[in-house]
Amino acid sequence: MSLSINTNASAMVAVQTLNATQTALSNAENTISTGLKVSSAADNAAAYGIAQQMQGNVSGQSAVNDGLSFAAQTVSSTSTAVNQIISVLNSVQNAVTTLGNNQGSPAALDQIGTQITGLLQQIDTIARNATFNGVNLISGSTSDGLGITSNNLSYITGLQGDQTTITGFNAAIASYMGG
């Protein structure tokens, strides 16, 4: 008895269809796993080259967006600090106005000088702490790291432009030069 293998034309078509389906499934799985329609140069060299260039452009754009976001957050931090400093400067203005009205009383002048010193220290603290990721746009590069570089507070005391200067943060009115 001899052995014979009968081939069925329909079975051969089914096997070919199954192989084609397996290949298509493998390609679809590759596309899904990489997220790319053209995942290698073997798929389509021209499309792959264009895709690589576009991915480079997207990465560059992402880096620019990150930089702009960092800059926006730094400016926002600085803006918030500047608004706080303006508020404190309004308090300094009120204290200086009070100082001009109390020229005769050394105790009152000393108390106002202490208040002004506290306000200036508060400005220094705000300026030093206005930092985002190590960047501070307010604080100057002084030896003490403070944004205020002057030890004198000068203000106008009269309509004629008379000026008074307090030396040091709290001159304790001892160096108050009258107005």
Image (cartoon, rainbow, N blue to C red):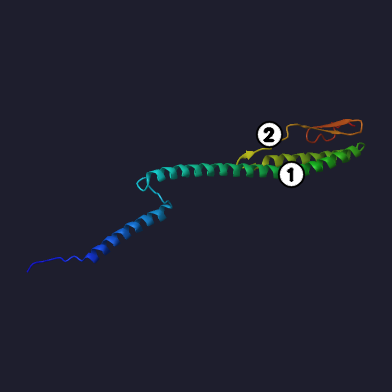
Task: Please provide percent x and percent y for residue 98.
Answer: 88, 41
Residue that protrudes farthest toward the left in the picture: 1
Task: Please provide percent x and percent y for residue 3.
Answer: 10, 66
User: Up-down: is 30 above or below 6?
Assistant: above
Residue type for callout 1: Asn
Residue at (81, 42) in percent of width and height:
90
Q: Nearer the viewer, residue 132 or 72?
A: 72
Residue that protrudes farthest toward the front in the picture: 9
Q: What residue is pinned by disc 2?
A: 140
Say which element carries label 2.
Answer: loop
Q: Quadrant of residue 97?
A: top right
User: Up-down: is 132 above or below 8?
Assistant: above
Screen quadrant of the C terminus: top right
Q: Nearer the viewer, residue 86 or 149?
A: 86
Say which element carries label 1.
Answer: helix
Dot 2, how many residues are within 10 Å of its Cα: few (below 14), some (14-19), or many (20+)?
A: some
Q: What residue is pinned by disc 1?
A: 83
Residue at (68, 36) in percent of width and height:
139
Dot 1, how many residues are within 10 Å of its Cα: few (below 14), some (14-19), or many (20+)?
A: few
Task: Please provide percent x and percent y for residue 21.
Answer: 32, 60
Whichever of callouts 2 and 1 sits on the residue coming sooner in the sequence is 1
In this picture, residue 112 sits left or right of residue 49 = right
Residue at (29, 59) in percent of width and height:
19
